[in-house]
Amino acid sequence: MKEQLSVIKIGGNVIDDTASLQRFLDQVSSLNGPCILVHGGGKLATSLAADLQVPQQMVEGRRITDEATLKIVTMVYAGYINKNIVALLQARGCAALGLSGADGNLIQAHKRTGTQQDYGFAGDIDAVNETLCTGLLQQGYTLVVAPITHDREGQLLNTNADTIAQELAQALSRQYSVRLIYCFEKSGVLRDTEDESSRIAAINKTTFSSLKAEGVIYAGMLPKLDNAFAALDKGVDRVVIGKWSDLPQLVSGQNGTTISHE
Ligand SMILES: Nc1ncnc2c1ncn2[C@@H]1O[C@H](COP(=O)(O)OP(=O)(O)O)[C@@H](O)[C@H]1O
Ligand SMILES: CC(=O)N[C@@H](CCC(=O)OP(=O)(O)O)C(=O)O
């Protein structure tokens, strides 16, 4: 039987709140078994860009990444946020190791092309270094992954953190039984985003299509669900979307929204 691996993604809204981040990391450090934590940080990058007067634009959940923006996101994601999370996990007795996609050639990508929109230095993933991941996980490290990738020709690229989590989860599902947990600030996929009690317990491809058509699912939740179905199609065991503070229950499948084939 394959060993269980948790791949957990935490979004920028939670990271931005110190008290929430600390409570979330208390829970991460208490989990059993190997774990990869992928973090975003879009909120902090957007506010720093505003301070520096670098205009920002998002298209279909992806940041148009010009040169100035690439510098900002690299400093924010692979620098401040990644190292802060690693230090906070170390303080909790967790053997955390921070990596961007360039470190150890963890994630190779190419500049997004072939679309009418020029996304600048936004990267689409080509390959994940599974050998590096499994080696480090077997040594007992919890990997903390920032959403910065590279093209192996010296160019750093900015890649959506939900997609990084999905690609790592599916690559590692050859070796592990992987549960992919997307943590954010709401209790799951909601029927009404203003009503926390309207959580939808399970979604499959058919219900996803109708919820999309009804306008119940929109904005950042659309690519998150596309990533969730892609992960299931490519061998990931379980995908759950839910509130960061419910992490133990999300891991055991007792809360949040479970994404399923049927
Ligand atoms: N049905 C829905 N249920 C919950 N959130 C939804 C729904 N439809 C759209 N959203 C939006 O999607 C957002 C989450 O996507 P995103 O901001 O990309 O997450 P993250 O914080 O993980 O980066 C929520 O904050 C919410 O505004
Ligand atoms: C290309 C692209 O869009 N990259 C994302 C990476 C960060 C991210 O995904 O952060 P959240 O999870 O907090 O949204 C961005 O710069 O916003």
Image: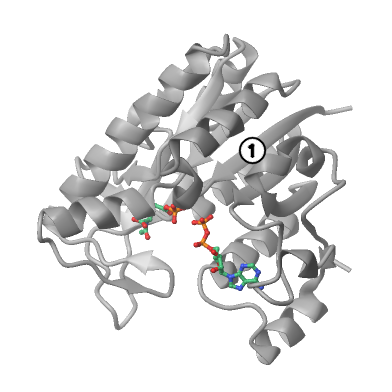
Residue at the far bottom in the pictured view: 213
Q: Secondary structure at mark 1?
A: strand
Amino acid on which the number 1 mark rests in the picture: Val
Which residue in the structure is indicated by mark 1?
Answer: 7
The one nearer the camera, 262 or 40, is: 40
In the image, the residue with mark 1 has its CB under 8 Å from the nearest atom of ligand 1: no
Placement of the C terminus among the 4 image quadrants: bottom right
State whether residue 152 appears in this view: no
From this view, report whether residue 45 is shown above or below residue 15.
Answer: below
Say few, some or many: other residues with alpha carbon within 10 Å of mark 1 (under 14 / 14 to 19 / 20 or more).
Answer: many
Q: What colouring method underlies this structural image?
A: one colour
From this view, report whether residue 98 is shown above or below residue 49.
Answer: above
The percent coordinates of residue 13 (x first, y second) are 46, 51
Placement of the N terminus among the 4 image quadrants: top right
Which residue is pictured at 70% across the width and 70% down the height?
195
Which residue is pictured at 77% across the width and 35% down the height?
248
Q: Is residue 167 left or right of residue 120?
A: right
| The quadrant where residue 18 appears | top left
The one nearer the camera, 196 or 261, is: 196
Q: Is residue 77 left or right of residue 66?
A: right
The one nearer the camera, 134 or 54, is: 54
| The quadrant where residue 216 appears | bottom right
Q: Is residue 116 left or right of residue 186?
A: left
User: Number of callouts in the render?
Assistant: 1
From this view, report whether residue 115 is shown above or below residue 204.
Answer: below
The percent coordinates of residue 177 (x first, y second) are 79, 36
| The quadrant where residue 31 appears | top right
The percent coordinates of residue 200 (x first, y second) are 81, 68
Q: Quadrant of ligand 1?
A: bottom right
The percent coordinates of residue 227 (x first, y second) are 60, 61
